[in-house]
Amino acid sequence: MTDRRVQRSSSPDCAIPIADRGPRGLPQPLDHALAQLRRRRVRLVPAEPGSVSEGRKRYPVCLTRSLLSRIPGSPALKDALKGAPATTAVFSGHAWLAADERPRIALEGVGGTWRLALPGRSGTFAALREIRTFRDVRPVGSRLVEVGPGVIERRHRIPLRYHPGVWLIVAVAVRRDGPARYDTWVWHPGRRCATALWWEEARRVIDLFRDLAASWFWVGPPPIASGAGSNGQPSTRATAASGTEPSSHA
């Protein structure tokens, strides 16, 4: 079932481009993880004792106190913020990919090194075992969300049979003057919160969804007027989207 009502989103238009590096020149896994952090879909937990960059390239980052204080499931971070100078509104530091290819962050004024982690039990959504082929990402519903001026996304809801009551969201945003941009996350309706997917799993899901789109329907801007397709049936067109604040993730 498709919901054609358009809802507005307060978050900036920021989704996954399929490329090796993100728009800020960061390695794509790191750029993706920092985007999920800004959307509060990941936690910040203390890294392993003695965790350092070990010669890996470090990238400058700046995170606001407002964002850090609202990251869910991060009690150690909240305690560290209490000890930081009260006048500091923006914390600068560095981020890098550790040996396990997971991001680490060190911020001035917030002691120690921090590891980005998925909410919930470790590994629960690191790999979606029920998503194996493009047939497994067939949506059962979708809705439109306005994420910016002239940018409409369609968020497709896909059930996860190993996680009853939880949805996989695949969102596709299409600009009239640019290519489609994709994002995906796990949505928990009962708790009204979202869980990120790591870059490699997000890319795998999006690639499967693109395969589905190529074999099932064309993904593009909303049609101006409905008409019949080449087979005589009404043409099916869909757009979709990126992430937003938790209240409108689904």
Image (cartoon, rainbow, N blue to C red):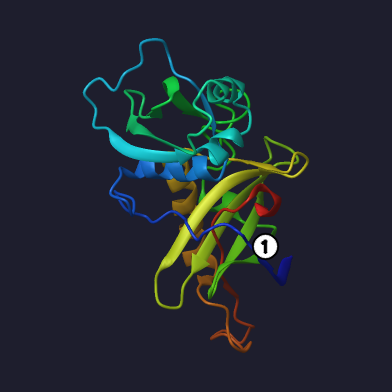
List x then y, in percent, for residue 51: 36, 16
Secondary element under disc 1, as helix, strand or loop, is: strand
- Say which residue appears at 68% left-offset and 64% top-offset: 143
- Say which residue appears at 48% left-offset and 34% top-offset: 88
Q: Residue furthest top?
A: 49
**Structural crowding at the residue carrying mark 1, measured as other residues with C-alpha within 10 Å and reported as few (<14), some (14–19) or many (≥20):** many
Q: Left of 165 or right of it: where is 28?
A: left
Q: From the image, tell me which residue sits under label 1.
A: 142
Q: Residue furthest right?
A: 190
Q: Amino acid at mark 1?
A: Ser
Quarter of the rendering occupied by the N terminus? bottom right
Q: Is residue 133 above or below residue 77?
A: below
List x then y, in percent, for residue 226: 63, 87
- Say which residue appears at 57% left-offset and 57% top-offset: 11
Residue 230 or residue 202, whichever sits in front:
202
Residue 33: in sight, yes or no?
no
Q: Quadrant of residue 217?
A: bottom right
List x then y, in percent, for residue 103: 39, 31
Q: Quadrant of residue 156?
A: bottom right
Q: Is residue 204 above or below residue 177?
A: above
Q: Left of 150 or right of it: where is 5?
A: right
Residue 233 or residue 54, whichever sits in front:
54
- Say which residue appears at 34% left-offset and 45% top-offset: 28
Residue 234 or residue 63, whichever sits in front:
63
Q: Is residue 91 above or below residue 226?
A: above
Residue 146 or residue 79, whichever sits in front:
79
